[in-house]
Image (spheres, rainbow, N blue to C red):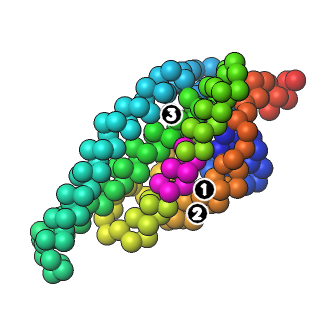
Amino acid sequence: MPDIERIPEQERRYYEDHILSTHHNPNRFDLRRDVLFDLMPPRAAERAVRRIDRQALPLLKRALEGLSAARERAGAEDGPARRALVDQLDRARALRCWFLTQRNVAAWIAGVHGFLAAKDRRERAACRAALREMVALEIENARDLLRLWKEGRTEFMAVAARSETTFLHGPAFGEQLRRKIRLMRKYGGATPRIDPGVMWRVAGLC
């Protein structure tokens, strides 16, 4: 969401309960920062978006198409060849979801910080358009990952057996994805905003 603070605290609790962050860490509302670290400046984020769009995603698309075609040629019988192809196809689908989320985090940084630094209406409009594209891509990406979670036959990521932890998703991962989709649809059109004093405000120092 272009303004993460627009999400009421109760609605974002499902992921903040396990976030590796103190309550006054600006990373809760600014994906560019963690404490006082600058994780990815906007120019680097713009380069990351271009590189993923031009290099990673087209190759993954070709790989998915090739694996899908090979799976169909293997026939319906559940033999070793088909199982191997299904395994690789599921893992490639998961990898594409991961790359798209990384791409969209970079797009968030470039778009939100670009909007805040923009000098004129044209620049702000371009950033808003890029952020709308980012939200739409991530909604569809989350839906793809949810389909893989529900229908896939491959253990493509580590999952905690009982409940979510800071480092592992739990059995409720599907419901977390559904919540994410609902929040993106509800708040994804917000005007980009980051409170520059959030670190001190949330800590109760101003």
Q: Is residue 29 left or right of residue 171?
A: right
- Start and end of the magenta stretch? 134-141
Looking at the picture, tell me which residue is in the foreground, 140 or 7: 140
Comes first in the chain, label 3 or label 1: 3
Q: Is residue 14 left or right of residue 142?
A: right
The residue wearing badge 3 is 106
Using the rendered image of the protein, determine whether residue 30 is visible from the camera's viewpoint. Answer: no
Comes first in the chain, label 3 or label 2: 3
The amino acid sitting under disc 3 is: Ala
Q: Is residue 34 left or right of residue 91?
A: right
The residue wearing badge 1 is 180
Q: Position of residue 55 (x, y in %)?
A: 31, 36
User: Can you tell which mark lies on residue 178?
Assistant: 2
Q: Element under label 1?
A: helix
Point 80% across, 32% down: residue: 202
Q: Element under label 3?
A: helix
Q: Residues within 10 Å of mark 3 (few under 14, many from 20)?
A: many
Front label number (3 vs 2): 3
Q: Position of residue 26 (x, y in %)?
A: 68, 30
The amino acid sitting under disc 1 is: Lys
Q: Establish if 151 lies above or below 192.
A: below
Q: CA distance from mark 3 to mark 1?
A: 18 Å
The amino acid sitting under disc 2 is: Arg
Q: Establish if 120 lies above or below 179.
A: above
Q: Residues within 10 Å of mark 1 (few under 14, many from 20)?
A: many
